[in-house]
Image (cartoon, coloured by chain):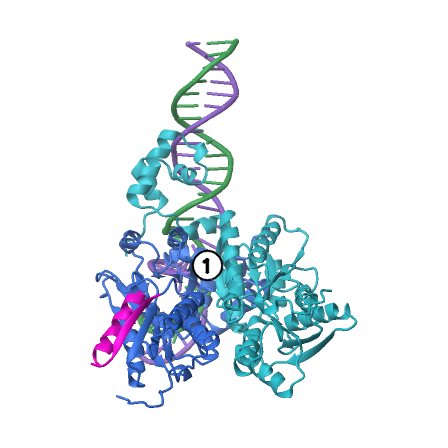
Chain colours: A cyan, B blue, C green, D purple
DNA sequence: TCCAAAGTTTGAATCGTTTCATTGTTACGA
DNA sequence: TCGTAACAATGAAACGATTCAAACTTTGGA
């Protein structure tokens, strides 16, 4: 109803020119102490709040950064988002958050929205094949940084985590604690993350001549899927002595099935390690060893890479790959006759 | 670098006036077929994207709604957010999401940001005491709807869930399945939600002359806290036959402690029910009964209430209270000698 | 052929900032 | 007292969209 107060009202109320008010807001040093006080008082009395649309229109660019993630509910992304917000705040930008929910059309809507908002740049964990759209954005001066996905060519910067290294870490840890008959439990290896983690595990196993690695396909990446793999294992007998699951949910499912239904002991009979280090890992019946991804670094670095590209159109693109971290808990405590390798 | 193409460029390229281009975008019916096609082609060829800042500046209002939640990682809020986004999309608005992380200063920053963005309105799950700020916002024509908090006076609309009813549902269900010696496990009752749930449970227990309800304080609302309550119970003996936990994490902790460490059977020896119906409830060792909050309805209704206030300055404020829903799973299956009643 | 009504198109004015060339003021050394 | 440099303050122009009164075109009936 009542049109909100503008810089003009403030200027009038403080008996100065509009330019002066603007200077108070943006370049306080250019304004004398007396004037500044008068203007600030006026701002306070009138309850003036800068209209960002007008500022942005004049400036040609906004102070916001678009961030599109696959699933805000996923702790991995939640953590990345928070780190990105904090890093952006440090450089005076705000993050507009979009949750694509693995849905290409939602993703596309967010790209549209952010483009209309003239965001400084875009951080995205892509669902669909958005390379064409991203190319267009770049042409129009909106740089993009890929999150949790290695840029295929060198057209974009990206931040990602080395899943192969993570897989290696996990398997190596099982081997180091004396296990030799390992099993990998993971969803369809068509998922890149799963394939990479498996590959890393295989690499580690090849280092020990007497070690073997069996691959068990799971039907999805859930607790229930883990449970059925566990049941299957027990039914057929011939158990491995170390299990590496492609994520923590699977691991928790396997743990449930082995310990509850079948009275096997973890880690004495079978060691178990997951991936992601979700909150539940630490409070599982047997606290679960896992591989933690450096989410804070991901978010922070993504913002930094974007800043580089915003500053100079021709900044070199960089693909930053982080190495995950092993978190040891009870579920992989060394077996009794441990022949550490 | 290259200033992006404006409506003026499009107009020039299509040999029409700027007003015509605007009409094509906003009132296609006012424009002849021939012209429309020409303009649309020009838009396509130039890759024109509307500058929302300019549109907003002229319109005096944006098409965005601010939403500040306590924790996007919390499945409760994740679900509310998604529902709100969908409902907003239906009415042509976008949601700007802010995660206060239970932090009053982050919350305050988001309010500032959203105010500068001239959001249509604000949905907020407040951390600190923001009533003063909200009052100011309202004066300036930015309506607010409280989420997951009952408005204390009738100055605001709000959407919330009846925790008392939820507590009643849970306890009543334990009673209905034959349990009589109940226990309530919950963090400090200074948390409103906890206090309300307890109160509802007490109400239900009073309905059965031979039923009792014991209150067990927990140190926080986590799995580990639940586990220690469980351990304590077993150590002291004198077990209840039905336990109602103020949230699912506590319940899972209690379940771990009872079933694993102490070889008690759920639901045969003790029935167990949680609150929130998190994803893990269904995949617990014994699938956990719980109370589900109507998060989708919360998000949707919040947007609807806000729309009412946006439309008319003097819309009556409404406090909509939803009733949660009982989800029965194995953890509360009827005891053998069930005297339903 | 003319006129009115309906249908299209035009383009200047406007929104609230920031920018910047210009003007006004002050201080100080010559 | 004057000139000049440093400092402050001014206000018109610009950003890119929407709006709307006015101008123009078409249609169809008299």
Q: Secondary structure at mark 1?
A: helix
Q: Is residue A327 magenta?
A: no
Does any portion of residue B311 appear in the rendered image?
A: no
Q: Is residue A253 left or right of residue A31?
A: right
- Mark 1 sits on what residue? B52
Percent across and percent down for residue B204 are 24, 78
Relative placement, left or right, of A279 versus A6 is right
- Spot occupied by residue B285 in the image (x, y as percentages of width and height): 48, 79
Q: Viewer-proximal residue, B46 or A44?
A: A44
Q: Quadrant of the C terminus of chain B?
A: bottom left
Residue A148 falls in image quadrant: bottom right
Q: Is residue B213 magenta?
A: yes
Instruction: Please give left or right for residue B93 compared with residue A226 in the image.
Output: left
Q: Is residue B176 left or right of residue A58?
A: left
- Pointer 1 local density, CA inside 10 Å: few below 14, some 14–19, many at least 20: many
Range drawn in magenta: B193-217
- Counting from the top left corner in percent of width and height, residue D10 is at 38, 34
The spot of residue B99 in percent (x, y) is 43, 59
Callout 1: chain: B
Q: Is residue B57 above or below residue B298?
A: above
Q: Is residue B142 visible?
A: yes
Judge by depth and name the residue closer to the eye, B270 or B66.
B270
Residue at 49%, 61% in the rendered image? A116
Quarter of the view holding residue B74: bottom left
User: As rendered, which of B70 and A285 lies closer to the eye?
Assistant: A285
């Amino acid at each position: 109803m009542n049109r909100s107060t503008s810089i003009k009202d403030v200027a009038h109320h403080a008996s100065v020119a509009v330019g002066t008010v603007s200077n108070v807001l943006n370049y306080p040093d250019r304004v004398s102490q007396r004037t500044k006080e008068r203007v600030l008082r006026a701002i306070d009395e009138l309850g003036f709040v800068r209209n960002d649309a007008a500022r942005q229109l004049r400036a040609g660019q906004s102070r916001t950064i678009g961030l599109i993630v696959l699933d805000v509910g996923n702790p991995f992304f939640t953590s990345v988002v928070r780190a990105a917000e904090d890093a952006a705040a440090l450089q005076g930008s705000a993050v507009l958050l979009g949750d694509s929910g693995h849905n290409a059309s939602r993703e596309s809507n967010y790209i549209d929205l952010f483009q209309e908002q003239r965001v400084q740049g875009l951080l995205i964990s892509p669902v669909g094949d958005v390379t064409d759209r991203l190319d267009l954005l770049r042409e129009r001066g909106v740089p993009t940084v890929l999150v949790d996905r290695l840029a295929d060519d060198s057209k974009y910067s990206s931040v990602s985590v080395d899943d192969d290294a993570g897989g290696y870490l996990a398997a190596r840890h099982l081997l180091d604690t004396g296990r030799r008959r390992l099993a990998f439990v993971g969803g369809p290896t068509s998922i890149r993350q799963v394939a990479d983690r498996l590959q890393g595990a295989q690499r580690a196993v090849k280092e020990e001549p007497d070690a073997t690695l069996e691959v068990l396909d799971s039907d999805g990446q859930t607790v229930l899927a883990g449970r059925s793999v566990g049941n299957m294992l027990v039914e057929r007998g011939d158990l491995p002595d170390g299990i590496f699951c492609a994520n923590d949910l699977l691991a928790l499912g396997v743990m449930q099935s082995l310990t509850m239904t079948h009275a096997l002991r973890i880690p004495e009979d079978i060691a178990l390690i997951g991936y992601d280090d979700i909150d539940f890992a630490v409070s599982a019946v047997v606290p679960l060893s896992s591989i933690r991804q450096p989410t804070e670094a991901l978010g922070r670095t993504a913002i930094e890479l974007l800043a580089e590209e915003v500053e100079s159109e021709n900044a070199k693109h960089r693909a930053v790959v982080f190495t995950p971290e092993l978190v040891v808990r009870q579920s992989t405590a060394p077996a009794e006759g441990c022949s550490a390798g």
